[in-house]
Amino acid sequence: MVQALTPVCLPSTLTLLEASDVLVRFTPAVSQHATSGSVRLDGSALVKFDSSALAVLLEWRRTALALGSTFAVDGLPVALQGLAEVYGVAVLMEDSVAPV
């Protein structure tokens, strides 16, 4: 029996200043989830972010899809969803992200 992995919890701040570090620190966990068939992130802690957060999420989405995995984000802040709309990437995340 395969046990579901605990969601990867995003940090409270994900701006341009943190994006590279967050990618380095969290990509191994995202890849581990992807090889198990399901990447699930918890974005409920995100309180300070910019468009860099979208770039990080889209990179992880590409990783998941390339490995044949599903991709979902729980607790994505409404403001970040709005930012995705402004940048025209909300459509790329609609089927793969579960907003709160």
Image (cartoon, rainbow, N blue to C red):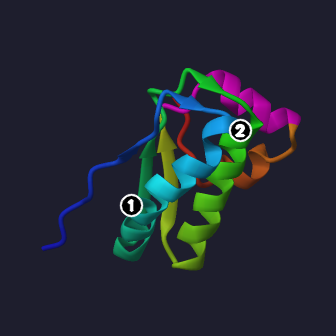
Q: What amino acid type is highlighted by mark number 2?
A: Leu
Mark before the other along the chain sequence, 1 or 2 = 2
**Residue, x 76% and y 37% (percent of image)?**
51
Classify residue 83 by image quadrant.
top right
Q: Secondary structure at mark 1?
A: helix
The question of residue 64 being in magenta is answered with: no
- Which label was assigned to residue 29? 1
Pick the front one: 30 or 100 = 30
> Residues in magenta?
75-86
Query: Residue 55 placed where, x, y %?
Result: 71, 49
Query: Residue 25 placed where, x, y %?
Result: 45, 54
Residue that carries the numbered disc 2 in the rendered image: 16
Q: Is residue 35 left or right of residue 23?
A: left
**Residue, x 45% and y 26% (percent of image)?**
45
Q: Is residue 12 left or right of residue 79?
A: left
Query: Residue 84 placed where, x, y %?
Result: 77, 38
**Residue, x 46% and y 34% (percent of image)?**
11
Q: Residues within 10 Å of mark 1 (few under 14, many from 20)?
A: some
Q: Secondary structure at mark 2?
A: helix
The question of residue 84 being in magenta is answered with: yes
Seen in the picture, residue 16 relative to 63 is either above or below; the reply is: above
Instruction: Indicate which label's residue lies in the foreground, 1 or 2.
Output: 2
Seen in the picture, residue 78 relative to 62 is either above or below; the reply is: above
